[in-house]
Amino acid sequence: MSGKRKKEKAASPLLAAGTARVSAVEHLHYTSQMPACQAWRYYVERVREATDFPAIVEETVGSLPRRVDGRPAMVKCPWHDDHHPSLAVYPDHAHCFGCDWHGDCFTWLMQRDGVDFRTALDELAWRVGIPKPHWTPEQEKAAQEQREYEDALALAARHFASRLQETPAALAYARGRAWSDEVIRAEGLGYANGGPLPALGNERAQRVAEALNNWAGRVGGAIVYVHRNGGRVVYLAGRSIAGKEHYNPPRGLAGERRPYLNAFYSIRSETVIIVEGQADAVTLSGWGFPALALAGSGLTGDLASRLQRHAKRGATLYVVPDADGRTDVAGLAETVGPLLRVVTLPEGVADTNAWAQQGATAEDFRGLLDAAPYWLDLQIENAAAAQGVARDKAVEALFPLLAQLPPIALARYKGRVTKALKEIRARDFDRFLRAARQAQADQHAPAEVLEGHYPVIAPALDFLDNLAVVTVPLLAKKVDGRLAHFPYLVTSDRQIIPADGERMVDIGGRTVILRDPPAALGNVTRWKYSDIRAYLKGDAPDPVETYLEVERLLDRYIDFRDEGTSDVLALWVMGTYLYPLFEAFPYVALMGPKGSGKTKTLDVIAKLAFNARVSSSMSPASLFRVVQATRGMLGIDEAERLGNSKDPIAADLRLLLNAGYKRGSPAIRCEGDDHQVVEFEVYGPKMIASIRGLEDVLESRCILINMLRTAGHKGNLVVSEYSEDWARARHGLYCFALQHFEDVRDRYLAGAGADGLNNRQAELWRPILAIAAYLDDCGANGLLALIQDYAKRKATEAEEINLDDWRLALLLALHKLAVLENSTEVTPKEVRDTMADFLDESDGISAQWVGYRLREFGFQRRRTGKKRLYPVSAQSVMDVMLRYGVESAEDGKAV
């Protein structure tokens, strides 16, 4: 840089102003490890925040007239032949009412100096002393794409603004909202009704504008709110004229909802009014107040950071809650601190805009601001008015708020608290304050690393080497009088331990860490307290008797087609109390037409299985949390919904089923407005009922039970809570899990009964076979052989189902050629022609398709001139047929 250029910059009034503010931003740093768009916004926002925009304007137009009424300075616009001042200069942007020019500090330099955005950004960053970060190619690309998107959104905003000015009825509606023409233009309000849109030159922006425009057409026309940040258009939203319907473009197109910042707002504003809706912020713009409308955006991420920066700068923050109670005042106070001022609108007034329509003025609103109490004062008043336990809790909640105050404010509030709360003396105040500060310090103290020192268990149901734990909710009355279901841990050491919120628990002389706080969901106790007491005193139901009782209940109510099905399901129910022992646990798929007993089977299983629930009773938001917290069996009725894209729970069920078959495969979801990545442990037993079949991958994880309509008396039996002693059966199941888990685990690890099954089928059946093997040893003679035979039949059916007709015919053709005719090499054409012997219709099968399938089954080709030969042998063909359970048609043997 030349000396002359350095001298020019040093003389700039902006540099002097910016340098004085560098200390406020010099601690900020930028990292290439940030996500690209986040790093870009971080840099741009800090430069904009540190830049004195009016000083930049003064470099071009001379000194700005100073207004004392809060209105923007008006000067002649340098971008057109302006005879009367028509350029309104706000704290961080400007708008010309003559030529409609609109821009921020970056746009001003681009217009004035003829440079691109990147040059203007770097110039201003240098002026205010913010170092230029190193950009990765990914960040460079993301920054450029975001800028192009915002430029295109600005074109859409101008189009909608023109439509508003050209549509008398829409303009009259906007004026009827108590908005002047000056405010309408300054805020960039627009109108959409489904009419033609111009080409915006950016696909993403085009789709956002079209989505908003199409919606507006469907509702008969809508006002368009233009969300800006420092003068840049970043988001579009709508509000129907005919009703109170609001619209935000799809999140996948437009991103997360953004707050609405009115024309007077700036990150450097000394006063900021927080309101709920865009219309309120527009109204406050007409009155000359800087306002931020939440507009449905969550108090997280960028919005929380923005509000906290205002608080750190010492700005006075007000919130004007809507009368409907939607505004999260407590959340705002938690975000910005207890000195948030809460404005109360007159009785019967819905919101700020409604008040303006009733004739309120800026002076009226100023009076409300002057009278607005601090959030902390309201909490002191609430504590003083409360009685008993509620008063104690309110007082306890006060001191963490007081601990956030600066010294002078704290001294003032000490007197207020001791005066309002007579029981709090000065020394009590100091003691409570120290405790609150210590608690806050403890939250930020380095954590003690416990990893590797203590075993971690899931409290709902889990097993260690020689310890089993299950959580049972029991109805209890606490000392404070609360009557509710509270969680208790019951252990294999025959202990019962109240789960009082502590995560480190001593069980049988050893310390364990609970992975999650124990949950007491629902208001039904599945293990009766009288039965628990019997267990604690040594009651030990015979495991074979428990199995026989569960099998009896299933056989009593359900007419199963295949012999042994009730035995398999009884063992599966027992496995729901043991499944954390296993690396995988099979799903059960109930397949059959309407009226075949699928739902009744689910009802019976739900009475018996561990913490069983049916998905239809849960919302998508609670589904993953309930499964993780309870570790219970999940029943899914009418599984046809899994393929319905409009079903709100279908996508969650698919994710849960895909992740829930094997241990260690959590379901990963993005939750909340800031899209926090959350992992849910959803491994566990699932039972699925469906009229139609399941997709292949899901079906391969299931034991398939084919259901038929009941012809006998079983179809008339009603499954109710009072028809059987279900609780007694569950008592046996709980005791079985807590007292016999080690024996079952030993047989599982030894692979008991899984010989003769391929890898997937062995994985599927091994838990059921392990339980059967143990019960067989306990006296259920022949049970293991029965289950082995059943498993092999199902495995054979599953393998046959996995082959379509063409693939089955191909294997039979190979058997004929290689085994019966002793061929050692085959061509795809020979195999195709032989397949015709095993198909009613073979048209459409090409030699190329056969070649692909031969390689799929592991037969490798070799070239000999133009021929493609595939070496085969009787042994290799029979091996493939054995793996797929295909029987030879010629010799009638399973090969």
Image (tube, grey):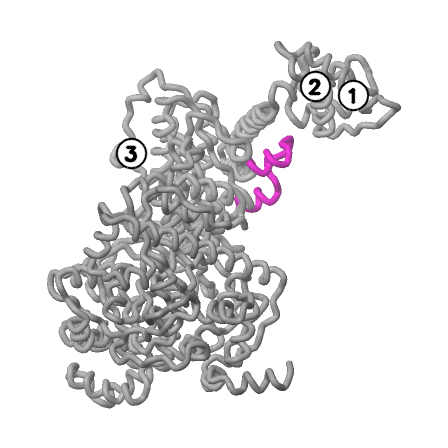
Does residue 333 appear in the picture of this structure?
Answer: yes
Q: CA distance from mark 2 to mark 1?
A: 24 Å
Q: Main secondary structure of the magenta part?
A: helix
First along the sequence among labels 2 and 1: 2
Q: Are marks 3 and 1 in contact (CB under 8 Å)?
A: no
| Residue density around tag 2, few if under 14, some if 14–19, many if 20 or more, within 10 Å | few
User: What residue is disc 2 on?
Assistant: 846
Magenta region? 740-765
Percent across and percent down for residue 342 are 22, 71
Residue type pointed to by label 3? Glu
Mark 1 Cα within 10 Å, few/some/many (few <14, many 20+)? some
Foreground disc of the pair 3, 2: 2
Question: 426 or 334, which is in the foreground?
Answer: 334
Kind of residue at badge 2:
Ser
Give the percent coordinates (x, y) of residue 459: 42, 56
Residue on which disc 1 sits: 874
* Coordinates of residue 878 in the picture (x, y in percent): 73, 22
Closer to the camera in the image, 155 or 408: 155
Q: Is residue 295 depicted above or below 603 in this figure?
A: below
Residue hosting label 3: 724
Give how far apart the Cα atoms at labels 3 and 1 are: 57 Å
Q: 370 or 178, which lies in front?
A: 178
